[in-house]
């Protein structure tokens, strides 16, 4: 029997009845009362003006005719909108941050270098004397200077790529990679990359049509400058264009340009031709 009034009385009588010493019962400490939180003051409710009764349904309302203010017409809000709602909407419109006008997106830059010699037939033939290698070196030096192109790397394979880099300050850098011209095939690949810069990037669409004009520019430049064109060079051109057309068809081209119709079929390798090193490059303005 513990706790309560009877428990306390039993604790006092039990030592007397049973002859036990009286033991003082420890008193439990009283927990301090929790502080009462102060009630927050109730803010007075803002006065809301009652909106005027709208006559008719929402789709029956007609806007108020425009009013002339300082020579400009301003359309008032519909009569169904209350004064408070109109003020709130006007306040939102006034405090909303103005949308930053984005600059128009610019398309791909078409290089203008050598535009006066967009066709290799527009320039005078390059006068070159000496051995064939000296003639090749002269053509390389003149072509690079004419179109403002820098050689990024001389490749060991018969592949190349033409690059156009446009920086934020407007600086334009034209580079290419190709094999060093030492024969008809390497010269054709080199002039093919020159042709990309000469005719301009993204001038012809689709991409396979640009490859066709770059190859055409290359062979015209070789013939115009009295450089030999072998059957291997022509076969390389046909094989490259066949690959470009096949890739365009795999990517879902809707129609093949008329210039590329002869290259739908795989070209036939010539019976007697010099073997060319390397293969066909991939990607970008590569061969």
Image (tube, grey):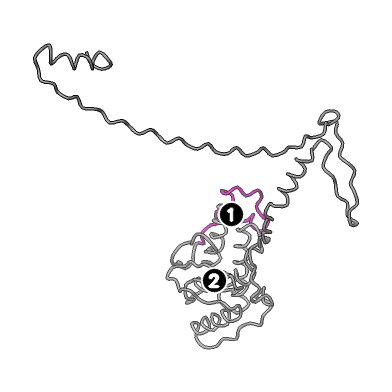
Q: Look at the numbered disc 1 and give the secondary structure of its residue.
A: helix
Q: Eyeballing the image, is 103 above or below 167?
A: above
Q: Eyeballing the image, is 103 above or below 252?
A: below
Residue 169 at x, y percent in the picture: 60, 73
Residue lying furthest bottom: 130
Q: Earlier in the sequence, mark 2 or mark 1?
A: 2
Q: Quadrant of the N terminus?
A: top left
Q: How many residues crowd mark 2 within 10 Å: few (<14), some (14–19), many (20+)?
A: many
Q: Eyeballing the image, is 43 above or below 208?
A: above
Q: Main secondary structure of the magenta part?
A: loop
Name the foreground residue: 130 vs 174: 174
Asked if residue 262 is among those painted magenta in the image, a careful observer would answer yes
Which residue is tagged 1?
A: 245
Name the foreground residue: 126 vs 151: 151
Residue lying furthest front: 16
Residue drawn at x 54%, y 71% as measured from the top left = 188
Residue drawn at x 63%, y 82% as measured from the top left = 125
Q: How many residues crowd mark 1 within 10 Å: few (<14), some (14–19), many (20+)?
A: many
Residue drawn at x 63%, y 56% as measured from the top left = 262
User: Which region is colored magenta?
Assistant: 248-270
Residue lying furthest left: 19
Which residue is tagged 2?
A: 188
Residue 109 at x, y percent in the picture: 64, 67
Residue 92 at x, y percent in the picture: 71, 48
Asked if residue 183 is among those painted magenta in the image, a careful observer would answer no
Residue 261 at x, y percent in the picture: 64, 54
Residue 30 occupies quadrant: top left
Q: Eyeballing the image, is 66 above or below 143?
A: above
Name the foreground residue: 137 vs 6: 6
Q: Look at the numbered disc 2 and give the secondary structure of its residue.
A: helix
Name the foreground residue: 278 vs 247: 247
């Amino acid at each position: 029997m513990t706790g309560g009034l009877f428990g306390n009385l039993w604790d006092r009588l039990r030592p007397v009845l049973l002859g036990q010493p009286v033991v003082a019962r420890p008193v439990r400490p009283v927990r301090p009362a929790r502080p009462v939180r102060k009630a927050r003051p109730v803010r007075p409710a803002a006065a809301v003006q009652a909106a005027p009764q709208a006559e008719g349904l929402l789709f029956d309302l007609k806007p108020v005719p425009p009013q002339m203010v300082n020579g400009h017409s301003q359309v008032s809000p519909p009569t169904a909108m209350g004064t408070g709602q109109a003020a709130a909407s006007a306040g939102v419109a006034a405090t909303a941050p103005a949308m930053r006008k984005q600059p128009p997106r610019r398309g791909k830059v078409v290089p203008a270098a050598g535009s006066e010699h967009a066709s290799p037939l527009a320039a005078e033939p390059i006068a070159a004397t000496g051995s064939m290698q000296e003639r090749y070196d002269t053509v390389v030096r003149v072509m690079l200077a004419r179109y403002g192109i820098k050689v990024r790397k001389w490749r060991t394979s018969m592949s190349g790529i033409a690059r156009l880099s446009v920086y934020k300050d407007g600086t334009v850098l034209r580079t290419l990679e190709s094999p060093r011209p030492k024969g008809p095939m390497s010269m054709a690949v080199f002039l093919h990359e020159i042709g990309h810069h000469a005719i301009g990037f993204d001038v012809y669409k689709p991409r396979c049509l640009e490859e066709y004009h770059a190859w055409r520019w290359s062979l015209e430049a070789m013939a115009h400058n009295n450089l030999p064109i072998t059957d291997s060079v022509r076969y390389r051109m046909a094989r490259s264009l066949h690959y470009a057309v096949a890739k365009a068809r795999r990517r879902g081209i809707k129609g093949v340009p008329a210039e590329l119709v002869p290259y739908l079929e795989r070209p036939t390798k010539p019976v007697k031709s010099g073997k060319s090193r390397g293969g066909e490059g991939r990607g970008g303005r590569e061969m």
